[in-house]
Structure formats: structure tokens, C-alpha cells
Image (spheres, rainbow, N blue to C red):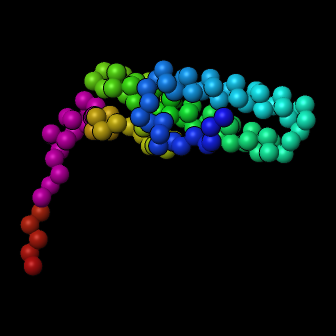
Amino acid sequence: MSSKVKAGQLWGKNKEELSQQLEELKTELNQLRVQKIANGASAKTMRIHDVRKSIARVLTVINANQRAQLRLFYKNKKYLPLDLRPKLTRELRRRLTKHEATRTTERQRKRATHFPQRKFAVKA
């Protein structure tokens, strides 16, 4: 069939074209595997590798397009799905938000107003 699939050519295609190409590649892979069992020509076994990688490229483009569409859908929503949120690190994900970190208790507020930090003039 065709030679290796180039990722650059895939980005311009729409969803239907990509799914059609994916089906073609999968049928070709099945045919190559059958031929490998039947006669075991070494040229065919090398082609299996290329077809598998081509399938991976097509799936990568399909998934990236899906994620881009989901990002547009959730752009101004209040909540984001977990897989669309920034990854960060475990520590940063668990850190208090800016609002949570600046909150004070009633007792702390009273203490701050009744006993403010004293300012001393230092004589040089």
C-alpha cells in the first residue's frame, strides 16, 4: 500500500478522513500479519513495523484534535475535567489556593486590630 504516514499531512485532515485512514492501516496490518505467518518474507515483517507506527501517528492526531475540541468546550466553564487540568507536581496540586492561604480566623483578626505591630523609631 502506501509508504510511511507523515504526521504533518495528518493535521490538515478532518475526523472522517483520519478514521478512514486508520481503518485502512488496521486492515493492512492484519493482512501483513497473515502473510508473515503464511510465508514469512522479511520485507513484509519490516513493513509491519512501519504500519504500526503509522497507526500510532494517526491515533495521536485524532486524540490531540479531540482534546483541542474539549478545551474549547470547557473554556469558560466553572469546572474542568481532571485530564484537562494542568499537571504540575503533586506538591503544587495539593498546595492551598491564594484565597485559602490568606484567610484568618476571627480570633486572629481581633488580635491584629487590638494589638497591632508596634513601630519604633531608631535613632542613628
Residue at 20% over, 34% down: 110
* Figure disc tally: 0
Q: Nearer the viewer, residue 24 or 101?
A: 24
Q: Quadrant of the N terminus?
A: top right
Residue at 54% over, 23% down: 19
Residue 3 horizontal side relative to residue 73, left or right = right
107 drawn magenta: yes
Camera sees residue 86? yes
Residue 98 horizontal side relative to residue 70, left or right = left
Residue 75's x, y, as percent? 31, 26
Residue 31's x, y, as percent? 77, 27
Camera sees residue 94? no
- Magenta part of the chain: 103-119
121 to 99, vertically: above or below: below
111 drawn magenta: yes
The answer to which quarter of the image holds residue 11 is: top left
The answer to which quarter of the image holds residue 37 is: top right
49 to 81, vertically: above or below: below
Residue 59 horizontal side relative to residue 79, left or right = right
Residue at 57% over, 31% down: 59
The furthest residue to the front: 1
Q: Quadrant of the C terminus?
A: bottom left
Residue at 21% over, 35% down: 109
Residue 65's x, y, as percent? 44, 30
